[in-house]
Image: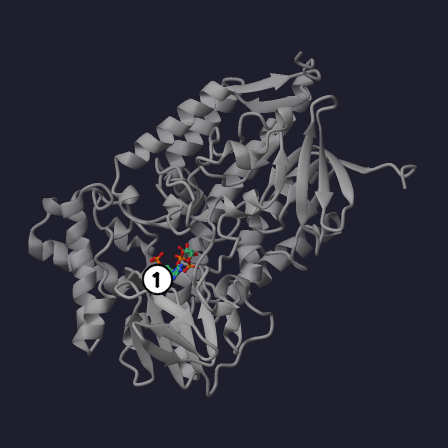
Amino acid sequence: SPAESTEAYDVVVVGAGFAGIYMLHRLRGLGFSARVYEQGDGVGGTWYWNRYPGARCDVESMQYSYSFSEELQQEWQWSERYAPQAEILKYANHVADRFDLRRDIQFDTRIERAVFDERTNIWLVTMSGGREVEARFVVLATGCLSNARKPEIKGLESFKGPVYHTGNWPHEPVDFTGQRVGLIGTGSSGIQSAPIIAEQARQLTVFQRTANFSIPARNATLTDEERETFRKNYPEIRRFAREVARNGIYAEQPDRGAFDDSDMTRRGKYDARWERGGLTFMYAYNNLGLDRTANDTAADFVRSKIAEIVRDPATAKLLQPNSHPIGTKRICIDTDYFATFNRPNVSLVDIKANPIQEVTANAVRVAGTDHEVDTLVMATGFDAMTGSVAKIDIRGRDGQTLNQKWAEGPKTYLGLMSAGFPNLFIITGPGSPSVLSNMIVSIEQHVDWIADGLVHLRRQGMATIEAGSEAEERWVAHVNEVAAGTLYPQANSWYMGANIPGKPRIFMPYIGGVGVYRRICDEVAAKGYEGFVMEAEVRSRRA
Ligand code: NA7
């Protein structure tokens, strides 16, 4: 009723994934009132939704973890080199309990709308169900790979069996025993789930549009010694990940280009990295992301490995990626993916040459052939980086919506704020390193920067902070310029928005490296938030 006053907080945080829960923790510590709204019924974000078989982080567990609490990083016991989804979710829950975060999180609640009132400098935020809450600041901790996308495929609705999406997997494990399963999509999710589904199912048919580069994970149980080595060296490991490593992962950095070594030495290095496994395969040389001929040496190596592993030559050929330079789509980390195609119950269907014509009640039709299946698994990815923001009706100054402003591609200053939307922050937004990095490193940096910013505003007695238009234009140009100097824009990747029909093709993440980016953010803050506009009062209404 109108008599009831609307709930009000200093900060409303949208999303209780790794970004949202750490943001809440920081805000509380600084004496801000805050409330987190989460659409799921638990914390964990990506790791809450992506419960598909084989889901694991591609960054090693000892590094894919918070650094803000020394006790936490010393005490938490990761069991494997790469943590499985269930363990990461358990970790998120542990953090929520340990820091008593749940009492300020409202679950099962979507944020539908956020409208900035220029007369009061207050955001009016509407939840699913219509309830409203007021906030001085809104932080979008909505995630980069959180808006699962089922593509439009003719006849999909007529399919009689269950259709699962890897990014929105049921909480009860799915049993594929005795089933004929069709898997559409060969990104990281498809590549992780295929070997496990194949073990269970009677038949697995993988529908591949684009062959992908994948490196063996070489996952293993972590030993006490390995954990101890990390724990003892955490100060240096975390410092390096934040300040030096381009992508927020502590690892030996390349000191030379691919042609600074002889063919034999190079082959030997690739072999050693292949045997060691993991993302750091790409750190063999410092020009793999920059120089196509250098890149080809790594790509050729992986293609030769695929040919060694896969026995049927036609299948091997189809699995060898040739549409993009290696690493320009996020490289996949697998356990027995290519070998899975040696199983008698697994087949590969090329849907690049012949796209899926339609899905019928019990089959996927390609080039006139019906591939009969009982169950469909869509590993078709996400409307990345902007998808979850775009689902919220966000209105800034002059009633402009963020979707209108971003119609030709997302525009931000530092990936943190967008001009015309005062007091609205995005964590790991487009224009920041985000998905090109160890997300937790990037999340902590953004959360800390935002927390410091809010303290600064409070000290200075400022009511609003907003990205300046000119600084934003310059940043957008810089992000594009840095990307254009690399091979990345050559791939039709979700970094480019290329997986969503009609989405503007813009290389969204900042590829300058997390260390460089952090220094830029810190300098901006040190110079009194250069490029941001701060105001103490309500801006006078324009005529
Ligand atoms: P990705 O990497 O976006 O992969 C999606 C896959 O689905 C990819 O192989 C796509 O082919 C395929 N796809 C998408 N739409 C279609 C349609 N309409 N028809 C056929 N095939 C399609 O998502 P993931 O979930 O695997 O991984 C996302 C990130 O999560 C990953 O990079 C890690 O960082 C963790 P395409 O390549 O577009 O031809």
State which quadrant residue 534 falls in: top right
Asked if one can make out residue 523 in the rendered structure from this viewpoint, the answer is no
Q: How is the image coloured?
A: one colour
For the residue pair 338 and 248, the one nearer the viewer reads as 338
- Number of numbered tags placed on the structure image: 1
Find disc 1 in the rendering and name its residue: 333
Which of the four quarters of the rendered structure image does ligand 1 lie in?
bottom left
In this image, 190 relative to 424: left or right? left
Q: Mark 1 packing: few (<14 Cα in 10 Å), some, or many (20+)?
A: many
Residue 32, image x, y percentages: 72, 34
The residue lying toward the viewer, choosing from 534 and 472, is 472
Q: Position of residue 219 (x, y in %)?
A: 37, 67
Please tell me whether residue 1 is drawn above or below residue 49 in the rendered image: above
Residue at x 24%, y 62% (from the top left corner): 274
Q: Is residue 144 visible?
A: yes
Which residue occupies 37% across, 40% down?
A: 507
**In the picture, which quadrant includes the C terminus?**
top right
Pointer 1 residue Cβ closer than 8 Å to ligand 1: no
Figure check: 474 above or below 208: above
Q: Residue at x 35, y 41 (%)?
A: 246
- 349, 422: nearer the viewer: 349
Q: Position of residue 417 (x, y in %)?
A: 54, 31
Residue 501 vs residue 539: left or right? left
x and y percentages locating residue 367 in the rendered image: 29, 72
**Vertical position of residue 191 compared to residue 253: above or below:** below
Q: Kindly give the residue lying farthest to the right in the view shown.
A: 3
Q: Tag 1's secondary structure?
A: strand
Q: Looking at the figure, which quarter contains the N terminus?
A: top right
| Amino acid type at image mark 1 | Ile
Asked which quadrant contains residue 301, the reply is bottom left
